Structures are given as structure tokens and as C-alpha cells.
Image (cartoon, rainbow, N blue to C red):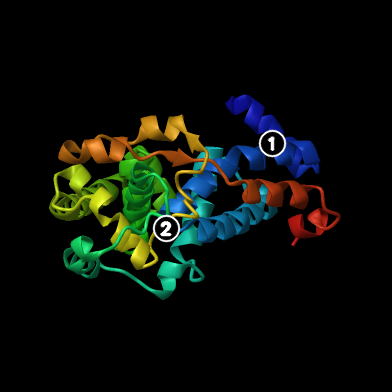
Amino acid sequence: MDQDREKLIDLAVAGDRDALEALLTQAQDMVFHLSLRMLGTVPDAEDAAQEILIKIMTRLSTFRRECAYSTWVYRIAVNHLKSYKKGMFARRPLSFEYYGEDIRCGREGDMPDLSQGVDRALLAEELKYSCTNVMLQCLDPEERCIFILGAMFRADSRVAGEILDMTPEAYRQRLSRIRRRVGDFLGEYCGHAGGSRSCARRVDYAAATHRLDPRNLEYVRLERTEEYKQAMERLDELSLLFDSLPGYRATPRSRRFLEELLRSGEMDVVRNT
């Protein structure tokens, strides 16, 4: 596989459109999945993933092969996402304290049925995936990267350190501290991890506060990738929660963008920018 990818890189740099398409298609799912975890909403992840793919395309000739192609792709993606300012949560930052207070004060028992006839188990599943991604926004961008790479993508500390430009030892120490913070929060509030709140009970409150739209279930309709689900690390007492979180393939909108870009007359101009 590595030899085939080396050939694809050589061909793409030389101007072979099919080779470039193959490389970008290989990167598309992992770029979208990382963007979704980092930014917390599907529209923001779609937009950021498009920008990252353009960066990969325009910088491919600078890839010196001193690391794996996937490491290089993740480094570009991480650097872009850490400084991404257009996402919803970049404009409305969260903290564990704020999010915890919101969960505590949620008036689940006072809400009417707002399911709009949609299966409530499906709504609870959507809320679980949405809430977990929102929870990640309580970490600052670098902490989020560390946690996602270590706890969700199960990256080796050497590779993760290379992506984040830190030593493996520093990466492991920071990951351990972040795990404890996330674990403490989930252990107190998340019913899937032994906490006091249940997604099923919060469905109507989430719909009333526009955190959940029964007519537009973004997460449950996304195409999932079993390899990411299997790669998620078992996090001690929180393993049940993280084992249940899927990975996601790029959306149809993202795939159309890539196809149209690669076949456009402006592609050569973009590549040489």
C-alpha cells in the first residue's frame, strides 16, 4: 500500500489528475471525520474539510516523505482546524462549567412532547452523538486535537507528537490530564457513562432549545466507518460510551465538491497557487 501511494504521489505531482483524485479521495473521509470532531457541526466540518483538501492538493509537491502521507495529511488538517475561526463554536466558545450548568438546569420534566412523530430512540441516539461532539468543544483547540487523536483515533504517541509538534512524552502527559477532565465531566453528567442525565429524557428539552431538530437528524443519517469505531480506545470506566461512537465518511456534499473541483478548468490554477 505504501509503495502504491508513493507512485500515486509521484504521478500526482507530475500532473496526473487520476492519481491526484485517488490521493484526495483516500484523505477525504479522515479529514471530514477529524473536522467534525474538532468543530462539532456537520456544516462547519464540510466547509473546513473542503478547505483542507485544497491545501493538501496545493501543497502536495512540498511533501518530502520524511513521515507517512497520513501523518502529513493530519498535520495539515490539525493546523487548519486549530486556527479555524468560522465555526459556530469559535464564535460561541463553551466550557465544562457552562455546559454542566446547562445540563443541570435543563427542565426535562416540564417539556411537552416535541418529537414530531419521530421515533424517540432515534432522537436519543442523535442527541448522544451531537452532545458528545459539543462536549469536545469545551476543550481548547489543542486539547481537543490531543484528545481526539489519542482517545478516539488511537494514534501512537510518537505519531501524534509528530502531528502536533511535541514530544511523545509531553503528548502522553497532556492526554492523561485531558482524559481525566473529560472522564470527570462524563461521569457526572452523561447517563451512558454512569452520570445523572439521560439522552432519552433530554430529547424534548433539546428540541425546545434548538439543539435537536427532529426533521433534520444530521448524525444518524451520516454514513459511518467501522474502522474508526473499532479504533476508538477503551477509556477505563467510560469505554462503553466511546465504543459506541461511530466514525463518519465524508458527506455527499463534500464528495460532490471534490469531484467538481478535480474536473474543473480552474483546478490547475488552484494547484499552482
Q: Residue furthest bottom?
A: 91
Other residues around mark 2 within 10 Å, as few (<14) / some (14–19) / many (≥20): many
Is residue 242 left or right of 92 when viewed as pictured? Answer: left
Q: Quadrant of the N terminus?
A: top right
Residue 21: image location, x then y, percent: 72, 40
**Which residue does the numbered mark 2 point to in the structure image?**
40
Mark with earlier residue (1, 2): 1
The kind of secondary structure element at disc 1 is helix
Q: Residue at x 74, y 43 (%)?
A: 13
Give coordinates of residue 236: x percent, y percent. Answer: 17, 37
Front tag of 1 and 2 = 2
Residue 96's place in the image compared with 146, above or below, is below
**Residue at 27% from the left image edge and 49% from the top image edge:** 200
Percent of width and height locating residue 178:
23, 53
Name the mark on residue 228.
none
Numbered circle sitting on residue 22: 1
Q: Is residue 96 left or right of residue 122?
A: left
Name the residue: 51% across, 53% down.
77
Residue drawn 59% across and 55% down? 52
Name which residue type carries label 2: Gly
